[in-house]
Image (cartoon, grey):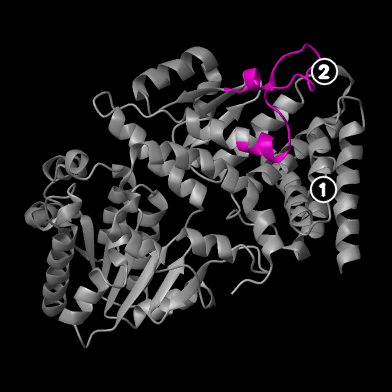
Amino acid sequence: MPSDPLLRFRRSAVQLHALAEVERTIRATDTGGRRQYLRDFSESFRSYRRVLSHPEIDQRACSANIVLVGDYHALPASQLYTAGLVERLSASGQRVILGVEAVVARDQRILDEWQRDEIDSDELRTRIHFETGWGYDWQPFSELLHRSRAAGAKIFGLDCSPRQDMRSIRARDRHAAVKIDELRSAHPDAVLVVLFGESHLAPNHLPLMVQNLREHDRIFTVLQNIDPVYWLSAGEPQDLVEAVELRDEVVCVFSATPLEKYEHYRLAIERWKQVRSHCVDLAPSFYNLITALFQFLNIDLYSTEHSANRAFLVDDLPEVWSATRNEEQFDRLLDRRLGPHAQNIRRELDRRGSYFLADRNVIVAREYRMPWAAEQAARCVYYACQKNVSRDGANLTPDDDFYLHALESALSFFGSKVLCPARKLFPESEVLERRQRLIPRAAQPTPDAIRMFGHSLGSELYTAYVRGEVSKRWLRGLFFKDVSKPGAAKALYTQAAERVQSGKLKSA
């Protein structure tokens, strides 16, 4: 169990603040959380025994007969973690069968046609009534199907109707338990991986029913991203906790943060509200990240104290161009507004899902993909803080330009890390070596090299903050510091690096 509440606070405070706004939106629409069936799950897992690694989870899964995986349907990371698990089990030499809740058992014939490549994915999606019958995002589920099929796994639907009526939920559990029993009997030499909604995996729900039918099978349950366990694990000494053991044969892996989890649920709710026009607006998700970071830095969006012309910072929040509202319209917008640069932005969107255009104060977004979304939000905050700083490019050398972008990268990485604690830090032993290697020489450094140079400092800033070696007031000053004069950016970068290094030496 974790022993450091201060670590938990420092790692979690900003995300908890951002999460509060999302939860208010969800509660206004989804009032089912008080039902006993759902409380059975939330009350069953409040603590853990010890920290585990992903390889330990895979090793346990390999030796099980049935692996029950908890699915948070709105979160793509849930489905993608399962795809990776199927791939790793298959690569280890195991024969794998995948059972999914998202497809009802009566549509197995259609699923079999797709697995034999007789129909394409679009026809599968239409014929199983994925949008109206399931309602969550197709893309991550489609990736799960494709990756599992490529790994050699046979896929089966386990669910039944009606899905929207909570009064029938225990009947659906009994149905799924029977289908699992049938699959185990038909494929006794295979590991059966079952992806089912997390609330179904409370100890007295589906796991108990399956165990009663399969007394001699070893059942291993892999839950994902349980909120109380996630917050507790933030107090562990290591930066990232991959997984924890909850009880015998039950573990929890962390494939996403609670903020990412509930933002995707909020987006799903928005999608359901606008299902007729197929519109989903990503702007609220980015604005929530931006305002949470402002509040972390104790910057009042509704104050004019940081503005030379009495303008409100809230009025400087970026415009968000969202591809999910209308793809064709979005492409026309990029071509019209960005001209020859549109193709470069499309490549960035393919790589990371979103991109902040500082010169236009616009976030261009095709999808909400953490932690890159958090880094773009942090860049927005940095540029808002720097709005009143005039930069005369004619007086700046290439060295100045390098350090200006490196500072932006450092503070953007720091901001993304406090918003998304699951983002990996640079190993402390490598930071100085990386920085020394990336210092600009005669050759012009690439944008990726500048980013990495900045990220190394951003990683140190976060570590120093978590350890209490630097204050939020000092960090806020980095965002507002005027670095427009020649040599100022390099001096500030060097000062910040020396400050965190001195704090590290004091704590050693």
- Looking at the rendering, in which quadrant would you find the N terminus? bottom right
Q: Position of residue 96 (x, y in %)?
A: 26, 72
Q: Nearer the viewer, residue 452 or 410?
A: 410
Residue 192 can be seen in this image: no
* Image: magenta residue range: 292-318
The residue singled out by tag 1 in the image is 471
Picture quadrant where residue 70 is located: bottom left
Q: Which residue: 33% across, 26% down?
A: 279
**Closer to the camera: disc 1 or disc 2?**
1
Residue 448 can be seen in this image: yes
Q: Secondary structure at mark 1?
A: loop
Residue 61, compared with residue 413, is above or below; it is below
- Nearer-N-terminus badge (1/2): 2
Q: Which residue: 32% across, 67% down?
A: 202
Q: Amino acid at mark 2?
A: Ser
Q: Nearer the viewer, residue 392 or 248?
A: 248
Residue 60 located left or right of residue 149: right
Checking the image for residue 85, the label placed there is none
Residue 458 located left or right of residue 436: left
Residue 9, compared with residue 138, is above or below; it is below
Q: Which residue: 68% across, 44% down?
A: 413
Picture quadrant where residue 358 is located: top right
The residue singled out by tag 2 in the image is 390
Q: Amino acid at mark 1?
A: Ser
The reply to whether dot 1 and dot 2 touch (C-beta < 8 Å) is no
Q: Which residue: 89% across, 45% down?
A: 494
Residue 216, compared with residue 73, is above or below; it is below
* Residue 122 magenta: no
* Residue 307 magenta: yes
